[in-house]
C-alpha cells in the first residue's frame, strides 16, 4: 500500500513538473514573439 502511494506521489510530482516546464517554454516563446514584433524596420 505504501509503495502505491509513493509511486502515485512521484507520478503527480513529475506531471506537475512537466506542466510547469511546458508553461515556462510557452511563456518564453510568447515573450520572444512579442519582442520581435516591437522591432521596426
Image: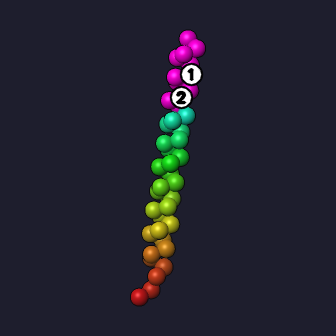
Residue 22 within the magenta-colored segment of the rendering? no
Q: Position of residue 3 (x, y in %)?
A: 54, 16
Q: Which SS class for mark 2?
A: helix
Q: Is residue 16 placed above or below 25 in the rendered structure?
A: above
Residue 8 within the magenta-colored segment of the rendering? yes
Where's the N terminus, which quadrant?
top right
What residue is pinned by disc 2?
10
Q: Is residue 6 left or right of residue 25?
A: right
Q: Which region is colored magenta? A: 1-12
Q: Is residue 5 placed above or below 19 in the rendered structure?
A: above
Residue at 56% over, 21% down? 6
Q: Position of residue 4 (x, y in %)?
A: 52, 17
Q: Are marks 2 and 1 in contact (CB under 8 Å)?
A: yes
What residue is pinned by disc 1?
6
Query: Magenta residues: mostly which secondary structure?
Result: helix
User: How are the residues colored?
Assistant: rainbow
Residue at 49% over, 42% down? 18
Q: Which SS class for mark 1?
A: helix
Amino acid at each position: 500500500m505504501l509503495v502505491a502511494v509513493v509511486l502515485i506521489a512521484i507520478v503527480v510530482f513529475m506531471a506537475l513538473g512537466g506542466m510547469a516546464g511546458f508553461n515556462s517554454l510557452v511563456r518564453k516563446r510568447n515573450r520572444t514573439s512579442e519582442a520581435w514584433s516591437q522591432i521596426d524596420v
